[in-house]
Image (tube, rainbow, N blue to C red):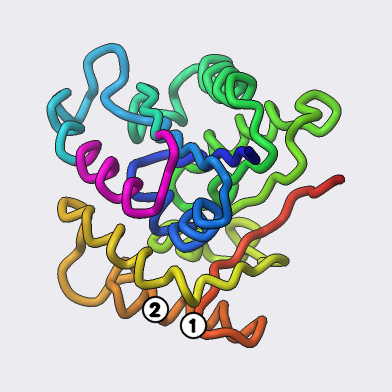
Amino acid sequence: MRKALVIAPHADDETLGMGGTIAKMAREGWAVTVAVMTGHGEGEHPIWPRDAWDRIRAEAGKACALLGVSEIIFEELPTSCLDTHPTHDTNARVANLIAGIEPEAVYIPFVHDLHRDHYEIAYAAQVAARPYIASYVKTLAMYETPTETHLRPGEAAMAFVPNEFVDISDEFATKLAAWAQYDSQQLKGYSPRAPEALAGLASVRGAYIGVRYAEAFQLLYRRS
């Protein structure tokens, strides 16, 4: 069975970023693992109590079940603290994750996302999945996450430039159903996370390839 690994800095990134693609890959027979890399951390968190993650992790389990995820892994890097967390530890945890699964395809957040956790995780994954080291990885690609990917101006960081699109017309309803499971992460009013906004982005991405809905990726490498 072909294996894919979706690395999410936080629970919900996987669904917002590529929930339709996950559902499509699962339907096509891939074993898709979602790894949520952050949580309370092993020490005292400076912002949230440990039980703050109980609810969102339960929501993640429901969302990933709807998407057809084979396995969901929760790591304990400290949320919103990765810019000060030892880089060697972040790198080691991501490297061990990838080596333990040996996935054919690895999906990571966009390295220039607004959230620093996204950068640190994307950087660690690129270090671990270097083609001459992780020879089993055939595809490495970055997904876009609403509320993070497009909120840095172009002069502050490189823009997300998609060069691969996945038709999720048949899976978009499943993506919305999965996103609805994240009740604690919904925002009131108009925002990039609103269902209408998700549909708008998917429609724009779909227009690039002449389909109703699509998700976009920035492909870092693909090899046979």
Q: Which residues are magenta?
A: 56-71
Q: Is residue 117 visible?
A: no
| Image quarter hosting the C terminus | top right
Judge from the rendering whether residue 126 lies leftward or rightward of residue 69; answer left or right: right
Question: Residue 217 falls in which quadrant of the image?
Answer: bottom right
Tell me, yes or no, whether the highlighted magenta stretch contains residue 59: yes
What residue is pinned by disc 2? 199
Q: Is residue 144 above or below residue 49?
A: below
**Viewer-proximal residue, 85 or 173?**
173
Q: Quadrant where the N terminus lies?
A: top right
Q: Quadrant of residue 166?
A: bottom right
- Magenta: main secondary structure equals helix
Q: Residue at x 35, y 22 (%)?
A: 76
Mark 1: which secondary structure?
A: helix
Residue 66 in percent (x, y) is at 32, 53
Residue 191: which numbered mark, if any? Answer: none
Q: From the image, tell me which residue sits under label 1.
A: 203
Give whichever of 139, 125 is nearer the camera: 139
State the image coordinates of residue 198 (x, y, percent, origin top left): 38, 73
Find the distance from the CA under tag 1 to the CA under tag 2.
6 Å
Disc 2 is placed on an element classified as helix
- Residue at 20% across / 60% down in the picture? 186
Question: Which residue does the image show at 73% across and 46% down from the upper left?
Answer: 139
Query: What is the three-letter code of the residue carrying label 2?
Result: Ala
Determine contact: label 1, label 2, CB under 8 Å: yes
